[in-house]
Image (tube, helix red, strand yellow):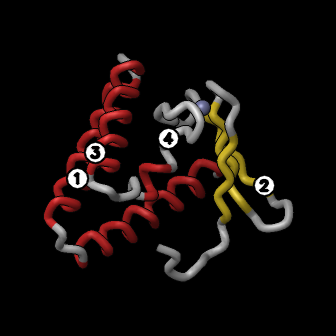
Amino acid sequence: MKRSVFSKLITKQVLHAEKIGVKMRSSAKQIARQRIQVLFQQAKNVYRNNPELSNRYVAIARKIAMAAKMPLPRQYKRQICKKCKILLVQGDNCRVRIRQKRETHVVITCLSCGNKTRIPLKKKKEQT
Ligand SMILES: [Zn+2]
C-alpha cells in the first residue's frame, strides 16, 4: 500500500513533466532531457547487476543537466540521494515511509548515508 501511493506520486509527476516537455521547444534542452531519460532508464536496468555503473549513469545525467543549465527534472531528482548522489532503488537502498505528522508527507531515507528527503503530499498548483 505504501508502495502504491509512492508510485502514483511518481507517475503523476512524470505525466506533468511530459506536458511541460511538449510545450517547451528549446532544442538543446529537449536533447538534454532525452539523454537524461535514457541514462536513468539504463541506470535502473543495470542497477541490479552493477550498482556502480548505474551510479555513473546518474552522475553523467546530472552533468548533462548542468551543461544544459537546466535543473534535473523532478521525477529524476527524487530518485537520487541529495547527499551521496546515488540512485535510490525502493526496497534496496532506500526506505519510503508515509508520515501523518502535521501535513502528510513521504519520507525517503537513503540507507547508504542516512539522508532523508521529505516530500509533501499536499497538492500545490504549478510551482515550477
Ligand atoms: Zn545517500
User: Of the residues tagged 4 and 2, which is closer to the observer?
Assistant: 4
Q: Please say if the residues under marks 2 and 1 sit with CB atoms less than 8 Å apart.
A: no
Answer above or below: position of 20 versus 36. below
Tell me which numbered mark, 1 or 4, is placed earlier along the sequence.
Answer: 1
Tell me which numbered mark, 3 or 4, is placed earlier along the sequence.
Answer: 3
Answer above or below: position of 104 versus 45. below
Task: For marks 4 and 2, give the CA distance.
Answer: 20 Å
Q: Position of residue 61 (x, y in %)?
A: 32, 41
Element type where label 1 sits in the image: helix
Q: Which residue is mark 4?
A: 80
Tell me which numbered mark, 1 or 3, is placed earlier along the sequence.
Answer: 1
In-front residue for pair 66/49: 66
Tell me the amino acid under the disc marked 2: Arg
Q: Which residue is mark 2?
A: 99
Q: Residue at x 39, y 62 (%)?
A: 14
In-front residue for pair 34/15: 34
